[in-house]
Amino acid sequence: MESLSTDPEVKTSTLAQAFYRAQQDARTAVRYLRMTAAEMGNPYGIGDKFAVGGDGTGGYMALALAALDKDSEVLLPKFIDSSDNAIATYGQPVPYIIQSMLGNLGGSNYGATMMDLDGDGTPETEVPLCVPNHPGYSDAIDMAFNFGGAMLDTVWIEAGEAPIASFQNTNDQFAPYNVDVLTEPVNNDPVIEAHGSLPLFVEQLL
């Protein structure tokens, strides 16, 4: 999930979009496995319960699957570019995650953007960024677990969502055990605030 740009807004938007697209891919995988069970003779021996987990970057993905379930949850202030450059370019703050381009949370609808591929300064070619697969199947999971990584905001956690088992190295330099600003590993530049295992545990108790 690392951007090579030195622009802090580009770093933040790159990480936000990377986690968003990773959780779309995971949801698509869950739908695919359910499809194989229903239509292909269940070659993978799929049951009716799904637990999803990951290490590091996979932890971000698993935690998003457990709790990120509303469009409004990717429109928190931390996911909005309110920089002077955004205001100068677009006349208003701009979300890092634009669902008409990247698709919905589940990756179950079409998303695209227009790009200038011939270099004439005018975007003329539609480039798909999300192509739905198996949208008729559920992407719901029954449990998530993470080894490292973090949740980008525990405000996502609500009653009735999938339970989370969270494991964290309290000395991890790049993923907080508590609440802290993530830093990228090359230059230690700040990227975005994230919530680790401690606030995840507390939030699930509330």
Image (cartoon, grey):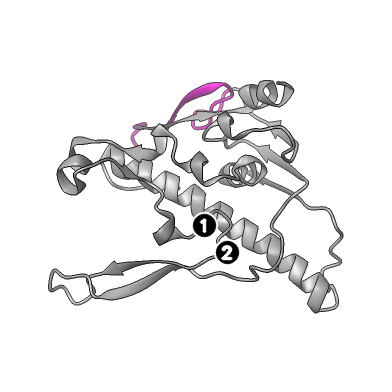
Amino acid carrying label 2: it is: Ser
**Neighbours of disc 2 within 10 Å: few (<14), some (14-19), many (20+):** many
- Residue beneath disc 2: 108
> Which of 192 and 132 lies nearest the eye of the viewer?
132
Image point (56%, 44%), residue name: 70
Identify the residue shown where x is 54% and y is 26%: 176
Tell me if residue 108 comes above or below residue 77 in the rendering: below
Instruction: Residue 147 in the image: state x and y as whole percent.
Output: 66, 37
- Assign a secondary structure to mark 2: loop
Residue depicted at x 51% and y 57%: 104
Q: Is residue 184 visible?
A: no
SS majority, magenta: loop
Please state which of residues 91 and 163 is positioned toward the viewer in this rendering. 91
- SS class, disc 1: loop
Q: Which mark is residue 104?
A: 1
- Span highlighted in magenta in the image: 171-189
Per the model, the C-alpha gap separating discs 2 and 1 is 6 Å
| In the displayed structure image, the side of residue 167 where residue 113 appears, left or right | left
Q: Nearer the viewer, residue 179 or 66?
A: 66
Q: Position of residue 205 (x, y in %)?
A: 73, 22
